[in-house]
Image (spheres, grey):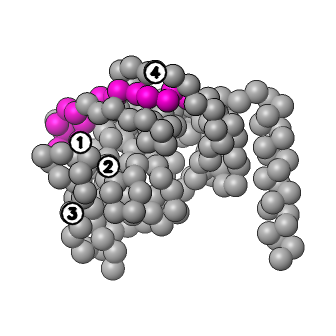
Amino acid sequence: MSDIIKFDTEDSLTQATVTPQETKIFNLVSEEHPILREVMPEFNFDNPPVNPNEFASALVETCKHYHGYGLSASQCGFKHRVFVMGHDDNYVAFFNPKLLTTTGESHIIEGCLSFPLLGLHITRAQLITVEYHDFTGTKREATFSGISARCFQHELDHMNGIVYTQRVKPMALQMGVKKRNKMLKNLRIK
Protein backbone atom coordinates (compact mmCIF):
# COMPACT_ATOMS: atom_id res chain seq x y z
CA MET A 1 0.00 0.00 0.00
CA SER A 2 1.37 3.43 -0.91
CA ASP A 3 -0.02 6.95 -0.99
CA ILE A 4 -1.58 8.90 -3.83
CA ILE A 5 -0.80 12.60 -3.85
CA LYS A 6 -3.73 14.85 -4.66
CA PHE A 7 -2.69 18.42 -5.37
CA ASP A 8 -4.68 21.27 -3.88
CA THR A 9 -6.56 22.96 -6.75
CA GLU A 10 -6.63 26.31 -4.92
CA ASP A 11 -2.85 26.59 -4.79
CA SER A 12 -0.93 23.74 -6.36
CA LEU A 13 2.28 24.90 -4.65
CA THR A 14 0.96 24.24 -1.14
CA GLN A 15 1.22 20.97 0.75
CA ALA A 16 -0.46 18.10 -1.04
CA THR A 17 -3.12 16.03 0.66
CA VAL A 18 -2.49 12.30 0.85
CA THR A 19 -5.03 9.56 0.24
CA PRO A 20 -4.02 5.94 0.94
CA GLN A 21 -4.46 3.81 -2.18
CA GLU A 22 -2.37 1.46 -4.20
CA THR A 23 -0.21 3.35 -6.68
CA LYS A 24 1.89 1.95 -9.47
CA ILE A 25 5.63 2.59 -9.44
CA PHE A 26 6.86 3.02 -13.02
CA ASN A 27 10.14 1.58 -14.29
CA LEU A 28 12.66 4.07 -15.62
CA VAL A 29 13.88 3.80 -19.20
CA SER A 30 17.60 3.34 -19.82
CA GLU A 31 19.78 6.32 -20.70
CA GLU A 32 19.98 5.05 -24.31
CA HIS A 33 16.20 4.89 -24.79
CA PRO A 34 15.13 7.04 -27.79
CA ILE A 35 12.13 8.56 -25.96
CA LEU A 36 14.56 10.68 -23.93
CA ARG A 37 15.47 12.52 -27.11
CA GLU A 38 11.90 13.07 -28.37
CA VAL A 39 9.82 16.21 -27.95
CA MET A 40 6.74 15.34 -25.92
CA PRO A 41 3.32 16.30 -27.33
CA GLU A 42 1.03 18.69 -25.45
CA PHE A 43 -1.20 17.02 -22.87
CA ASN A 44 -4.78 17.32 -24.13
CA PHE A 45 -7.10 18.04 -21.21
CA ASP A 46 -10.15 17.97 -23.53
CA ASN A 47 -9.45 14.33 -24.35
CA PRO A 48 -6.86 13.19 -21.78
CA PRO A 49 -4.82 10.09 -22.72
CA VAL A 50 -4.73 9.15 -19.01
CA ASN A 51 -6.38 10.36 -15.81
CA PRO A 52 -4.18 13.40 -15.02
CA ASN A 53 -4.47 13.12 -11.22
CA GLU A 54 -3.78 9.38 -11.12
CA PHE A 55 -0.89 9.69 -13.57
CA ALA A 56 0.67 12.58 -11.63
CA SER A 57 0.28 10.60 -8.42
CA ALA A 58 2.07 7.61 -9.94
CA LEU A 59 4.89 9.90 -11.16
CA VAL A 60 5.24 11.33 -7.65
CA GLU A 61 5.43 7.89 -6.08
CA THR A 62 7.94 6.79 -8.72
CA CYS A 63 10.06 9.89 -8.11
CA LYS A 64 10.02 9.23 -4.35
CA HIS A 65 10.82 5.55 -4.91
CA TYR A 66 13.96 6.48 -6.85
CA HIS A 67 14.86 9.31 -4.41
CA GLY A 68 14.56 12.06 -7.03
CA TYR A 69 13.59 15.71 -6.90
CA GLY A 70 12.00 15.63 -10.34
CA LEU A 71 10.76 13.09 -12.87
CA SER A 72 9.26 13.42 -16.34
CA ALA A 73 6.75 11.10 -17.96
CA SER A 74 9.26 10.42 -20.75
CA GLN A 75 11.75 9.00 -18.23
CA CYS A 76 9.14 6.33 -17.53
CA GLY A 77 8.46 5.68 -21.22
CA PHE A 78 5.28 7.76 -21.55
CA LYS A 79 4.75 10.35 -24.28
CA HIS A 80 2.94 12.90 -22.11
CA ARG A 81 4.10 16.49 -21.60
CA VAL A 82 4.14 16.35 -17.81
CA PHE A 83 6.66 16.16 -15.01
CA VAL A 84 6.63 16.30 -11.24
CA MET A 85 9.06 17.90 -8.86
CA GLY A 86 9.30 18.33 -5.14
CA HIS A 87 10.65 16.95 -1.92
CA ASP A 88 9.28 14.95 1.02
CA ASP A 89 5.47 15.13 0.72
CA ASN A 90 5.35 18.40 -1.22
CA TYR A 91 5.31 17.58 -4.94
CA VAL A 92 3.72 19.46 -7.80
CA ALA A 93 2.71 18.17 -11.24
CA PHE A 94 3.45 20.41 -14.24
CA PHE A 95 1.44 19.69 -17.37
CA ASN A 96 2.41 21.50 -20.59
CA PRO A 97 5.15 23.55 -18.84
CA LYS A 98 6.65 26.66 -20.43
CA LEU A 99 9.51 28.93 -19.45
CA LEU A 100 8.42 32.59 -19.59
CA THR A 101 11.43 34.52 -18.24
CA THR A 102 14.93 33.80 -16.95
CA THR A 103 17.36 35.84 -14.87
CA GLY A 104 20.97 35.23 -13.87
CA GLU A 105 23.07 32.09 -14.11
CA SER A 106 24.06 29.26 -11.81
CA HIS A 107 26.70 26.62 -12.57
CA ILE A 108 26.58 23.53 -10.31
CA ILE A 109 26.69 19.75 -10.48
CA GLU A 110 23.45 18.20 -11.67
CA GLY A 111 22.29 14.59 -11.80
CA CYS A 112 19.47 12.69 -13.47
CA LEU A 113 17.56 9.55 -12.54
CA SER A 114 17.99 8.37 -16.15
CA PHE A 115 21.80 8.59 -15.85
CA PRO A 116 22.63 7.02 -12.46
CA LEU A 117 25.71 8.40 -10.68
CA LEU A 118 26.57 10.81 -13.52
CA GLY A 119 27.19 14.26 -12.05
CA LEU A 120 27.83 17.04 -14.57
CA HIS A 121 28.37 20.79 -14.12
CA ILE A 122 25.45 22.46 -15.89
CA THR A 123 24.74 26.18 -16.34
CA ARG A 124 21.11 27.16 -15.89
CA ALA A 125 19.10 30.29 -15.13
CA GLN A 126 19.04 31.24 -11.46
CA LEU A 127 15.52 32.73 -11.38
CA ILE A 128 12.66 31.71 -13.69
CA THR A 129 9.00 32.51 -14.24
CA VAL A 130 6.98 29.65 -15.67
CA GLU A 131 3.54 28.74 -16.91
CA TYR A 132 1.92 25.32 -16.66
CA HIS A 133 -1.38 23.53 -16.15
CA ASP A 134 -2.14 21.73 -12.92
CA PHE A 135 -3.75 18.28 -12.98
CA THR A 136 -7.22 19.85 -13.38
CA GLY A 137 -6.15 21.71 -16.53
CA THR A 138 -6.08 25.10 -14.77
CA LYS A 139 -3.37 27.40 -16.15
CA ARG A 140 -0.94 28.66 -13.53
CA GLU A 141 2.17 30.81 -13.27
CA ALA A 142 4.98 30.50 -10.74
CA THR A 143 8.43 31.89 -10.04
CA PHE A 144 11.27 29.61 -8.93
CA SER A 145 14.84 30.16 -7.81
CA GLY A 146 17.70 27.95 -6.67
CA ILE A 147 17.24 24.18 -6.83
CA SER A 148 13.56 24.54 -7.81
CA ALA A 149 14.50 26.64 -10.85
CA ARG A 150 17.23 24.14 -11.78
CA CYS A 151 14.90 21.15 -11.40
CA PHE A 152 12.15 22.80 -13.46
CA GLN A 153 14.59 23.58 -16.30
CA HIS A 154 16.05 20.05 -16.20
CA GLU A 155 12.61 18.45 -16.41
CA LEU A 156 11.47 20.92 -19.09
CA ASP A 157 14.50 19.82 -21.11
CA HIS A 158 13.15 16.25 -20.89
CA MET A 159 9.86 17.51 -22.34
CA ASN A 160 11.84 18.98 -25.25
CA GLY A 161 13.93 15.88 -25.94
CA ILE A 162 17.08 17.33 -24.40
CA VAL A 163 19.15 15.36 -21.89
CA TYR A 164 21.62 17.13 -19.63
CA THR A 165 24.57 15.34 -21.23
CA GLN A 166 23.90 17.55 -24.27
CA ARG A 167 24.48 20.67 -22.18
CA VAL A 168 28.17 20.01 -21.45
CA LYS A 169 31.29 20.06 -23.57
CA PRO A 170 32.47 16.66 -24.88
CA MET A 171 35.55 16.59 -22.61
CA ALA A 172 33.46 17.34 -19.50
CA LEU A 173 31.06 14.55 -20.44
CA GLN A 174 33.92 12.14 -21.04
CA MET A 175 35.43 12.96 -17.62
CA GLY A 176 32.03 12.58 -15.93
CA VAL A 177 31.42 9.18 -17.54
CA LYS A 178 34.92 8.04 -16.57
CA LYS A 179 34.29 9.06 -12.94
CA ARG A 180 30.91 7.27 -12.97
CA ASN A 181 32.46 4.10 -14.41
CA LYS A 182 35.07 4.14 -11.64
CA MET A 183 32.33 4.50 -9.00
CA LEU A 184 30.34 1.64 -10.56
CA LYS A 185 33.44 -0.55 -10.63
CA ASN A 186 34.09 0.19 -6.94
CA LEU A 187 30.46 -0.65 -6.09
CA ARG A 188 30.74 -4.02 -7.87
CA ILE A 189 33.95 -4.88 -5.99
CA LYS A 190 32.36 -4.34 -2.56
In what element is the residue under mark 3?
A: strand
Q: Nearer the viewer, residue 123 or 158?
A: 123
Residue for badge 1:
134
In what element is the residue under mark 4?
A: strand
For the record, the magenta segment spans 124-140
Amino acid bearing label 4: Thr
Q: Quadrant of residue 136?
A: top left
Residue for badge 3:
17
Amino acid bearing label 1: Asp
Mark 4 neighbour class, 10 Å CA radius: few under 14, some 14 to 19, many 20 or more = few
- As drawn, the residue found furthest toward the left would be 10
Spatial CA distance of label 3 from label 2 is 11 Å
Q: For the C terminus, give its image quadrant.
A: bottom right
Q: Nearer the viewer, residue 129 or 140?
A: 129
Residue for badge 2:
92
Spatial CA distance of label 1 from label 3 is 15 Å
Q: Residue 28 location in percent, x, y?
A: 54, 56
Amino acid bearing label 3: Thr
Spatial CA distance of label 4 from label 3 is 32 Å
**Mark 4 vs mark 1: which is more N-terminal?**
4
Q: Residue 30 location in percent, x, y?
A: 63, 52
Magenta stretch encompasses residue 51: no
Amino acid bearing label 2: Val
**Mark 4 vs mark 3: which is more N-terminal?**
3
In what element is the residue under mark 2?
A: strand
Name the residue: 25% across, 57% down.
15
Q: Residue 188 location in percent, x, y?
A: 82, 71
CB atoms of marks 2 and 4 within 8 Å: no
Image mark for residue 77 = none
Q: Quadrant of residue 133?
A: top left
